[in-house]
Image (spheres, rainbow, N blue to C red):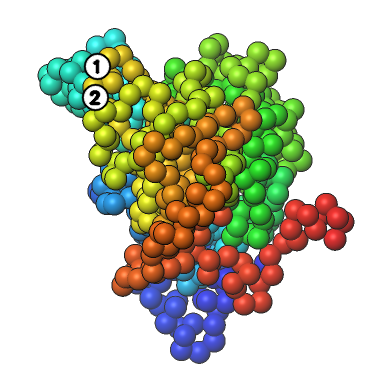
């Protein structure tokens, strides 16, 4: 089979001696050293509440690896917990991806099980696995149980925004706010609405990199432990079959994942992450592809923040298995998966087990998918909007720009119909593209019953955000993008149906403003943040580092491009 561990342990002379004796020091013997060596990438951290149960999950994976005849060895990497990391986990997604990639390259692992969950962790791990291309299986930590406050079901962090906004507007007293704070997060696991973590778990499964039906199992449900053990058993089989990410992560797999994203009404962040993962394999995912697939994929998952239910109900209704099974007529059923079978074979028997959560294709919640891609002179390289979480009355809107100096610096005299513009918070400018695109609604307007306004930024959104929020405007203001040329009082047109985002200012005036601006700031700074700002790509290119794309690697050509394949090259 030519395993990496074989050459490591059978190396003649002193180094083989050292490799064997140092492994034996941990209690393993020659019998164990003959087994496939399986890494368990455990991102357990007490600085990441979403992963605090990962020791138990890793133990279950280990049990499965032993059962199937492998030798499991656990190792840590960077772990990113959304609320704990400042200024934003997105600044460090690439750091985790580099850490994971280099640990997989540096150690003699034959295969790896990747334990991730919180928003950036699964994307980082899949980026690494795609680059290293050893057999790899993703396991997610699963969502928290629903929060409950009396009869009310609570969801992080959609209700974090909702409750604090209502409190700021004087609609919710301090004691009810404190009660919600106590009641919302009641178990280990990631956020339990269809935010970025839930979305990326389901997409990892749709890509074929996670065992079918496992993405939505609640974090503390015993079935998750069983899924972990099954994953441990399966990775040994994948090593024996030499089933690598490059066999699974094909263009068809990414198209499947995009359709699933649209059907979920999933997180806008997934657009960036899918582009980055595909980019590691040299597979281009232009924003236009997302829009094309969105237009022909109905929204069927009635999940917050777009819909009404949460991950627990989603799982009881059949979860990822039922969702992918329902969508099969629209997917590339022949795509290969981690099971060694095709997607269609994996999901052929899937069925919806509860009404109201996953709609049938013939009676969808909306004819189009959750995310629309915008183009126009305000976003020449594109922007995103989650149309299913926006106010229908604002999807076509023309209004006066109100330019914010900072995310919490909303002008006092904002009126309903104004458009809030926040520039300078993109990948370079943020830095790290923080989730500040859901600019807080002005309390004075909330008190008057105004619940939503058009808000436009080059920042990102939390996957749990809701409202008419345009984000990921590219290129960002910090590298000279036109969002930085918007002035107070300019008119802006948003027309989601026509996919337009236009600054209604003449070209000559924009050229005058551009000539008068200081232009892109020179990017300096020491350490990782300096490296990040010098090398990060724009949102429409996945925010990966330019030097991590396959064309930057020596002697490792990527697969043929989509166009080359269509041309029969
Ligand atoms: Fe980890 Fe929300 S904080 S998924």
Q: Where does residue 385 sit, x and y in percent of width and height?
A: 51, 34
Give left or right: position of 560 versus 323. Answer: right
The spot of residue 285 in percent (x, y) is: 64, 50
Residue furthest out toward the bottom = 13
Q: Quadrant of the N terminus?
A: bottom right
Which sits in the foreground, 504 or 543? 504
Residue at x-position 61% and y-position 67%: 550
Q: Residue visible at 31% across and 72% down?
A: 526
Relative placement, left or right, of 271 versus 284 is left
Badge 1 marks a residue whose secondary structure is helix
- Where is residue 384? Give x, y as percent: 53, 39
- Is residue 358 visible in the rendered structure shown here? yes
- Determine which of the numbered discs, if any, sits on residue 79 in the image: none
Residue 203, can we see it?
A: no
Rendered view: 95 above or below 451: below
Tell me the crowding category of disc 1: few under 14, some 14 to 19, or many 20 or more residues within 10 angstroms, Cα based: some
Above or below for 554 versus 198:
below
Please identify the residue farthest to the left as the structure is shown.
Answer: 175
Q: Are marks 2 and 1 in contact (CB under 8 Å)?
A: yes
- Cα distance, mark 2 to mark 1? 6 Å
514 or 550, which is in the foreground?
Answer: 514
**Quarter of the image that includes the C terminus:** bottom right
Residue that carries the numbered disc 2 in the rendered image: 443
Query: Residue 524 or 334: which is nearer the viewer?
Result: 524
**Ligand 1 within 8 angstroms of badge 1 C-beta:** no
Label placed on residue 447: 1
Disc 2, SS: helix
């Amino acid at each position: 089979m030519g395993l990496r561990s074989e050459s490591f342990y059978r190396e003649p002379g002193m180094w083989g001696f050292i490799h064997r004796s140092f492994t034996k020091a941990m209690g393993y013997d020659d019998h164990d050293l003959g087994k496939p060596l399986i890494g368990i990438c455990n991102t357990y951290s007490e600085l990441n509440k979403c992963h605090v149960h990962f020791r138990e999950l890793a133990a279950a994976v280990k049990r499965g690896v032993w059962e199937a005849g492998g030798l499991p060895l656990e190792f840590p990497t960077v772990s990113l917990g959304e609320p704990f990391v400042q200024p934003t986990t997105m600044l460090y997604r690439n750091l985790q991806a580099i850490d994971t990639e280099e640990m997989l390259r540096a150690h003699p692992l034959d295969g790896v099980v990747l334990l991730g969950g919180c928003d950036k962790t699964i994307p980082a791990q899949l980026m690494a696995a795609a680059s290293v291309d050893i057999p790899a299986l993703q396991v997610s930590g699963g969502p928290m149980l629903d929060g409950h406050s009396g009869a009310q079901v609570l969801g992080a962090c959609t209700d974090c925004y909702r409750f604090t906004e209502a409190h700021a507007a004087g609609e919710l007293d301090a004691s009810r706010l404190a009660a919600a704070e106590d009641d919302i997060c009641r178990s280990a696991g990631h956020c339990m609405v269809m935010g970025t973590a839930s979305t990326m778990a389901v997409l990892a499964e749709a890509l074929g990199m996670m065992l079918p039906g496992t993405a939505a199992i609640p974090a503390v449900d015993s079935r998750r432990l069983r899924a972990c053990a099954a994953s441990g058993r399966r990775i040994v089989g994948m090593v024996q079959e030499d089933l690598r990410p490059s066999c699974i992560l094909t263009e068809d797999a990414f198209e499947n994942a995009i359709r699933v994203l649209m059907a979920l009404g999933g997180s806008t962040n997934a657009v960036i992450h899918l582009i980055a993962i595909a980019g590691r394999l040299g597979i281009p995912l232009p924003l236009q592809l997302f829009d094309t697939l969105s237009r022909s994929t109905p929204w069927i998952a009635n999940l917050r923040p777009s819909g009404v239910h949460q991950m627990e109900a989603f799982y009881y209704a059949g979860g990822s298995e039922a969702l992918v099974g329902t969508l099969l007529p629209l997917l590339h059923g022949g795509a290969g998966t981690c099971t060694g079978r095709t997607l269609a074979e994996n999901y052929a028997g899937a069925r919806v087990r509860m009404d109201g959560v996953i709609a049938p294709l013939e009676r969808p919640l909306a004819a189009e998918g959750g995310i629309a891609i915008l183009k126009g002179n305000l976003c020449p390289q594109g922007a995103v909007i989650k149309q299913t979480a926006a106010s229908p009355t604002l999807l076509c809107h023309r209004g006066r720009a109100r330019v914010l100096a900072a995310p919490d610096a909303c002008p006092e005299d904002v009126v309903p119909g104004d458009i809030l513009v926040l520039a300078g918070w993109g990948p370079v400018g943020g830095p790290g593209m923080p989730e500040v695109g859901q600019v807080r609604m002005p309390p004075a307007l909330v008190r008057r019953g105004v619940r939503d306004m058009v808000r436009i930024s080059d920042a990102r959104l939390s996957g749990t955000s809701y409202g008419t929020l345009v984000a990921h405007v590219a290129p960002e203001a910090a590298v000279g993008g036109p969002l930085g040329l918007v002035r107070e009082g300019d008119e802006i047109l948003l027309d989601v149906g026509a996919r337009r985002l236009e600054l209604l200012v003449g070209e000559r005036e924009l050229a005058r403003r551009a000539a008068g601006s200081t232009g892109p700031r020179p990017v300096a700074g020491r350490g990782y943040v300096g490296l990040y700002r010098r090398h990060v790509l724009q949102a429409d290119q996945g925010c990966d580092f330019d030097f991590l794309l396959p064309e930057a690697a020596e002697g490792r050509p990527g697969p043929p491009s989509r166009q080359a394949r269509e041309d029969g090259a």
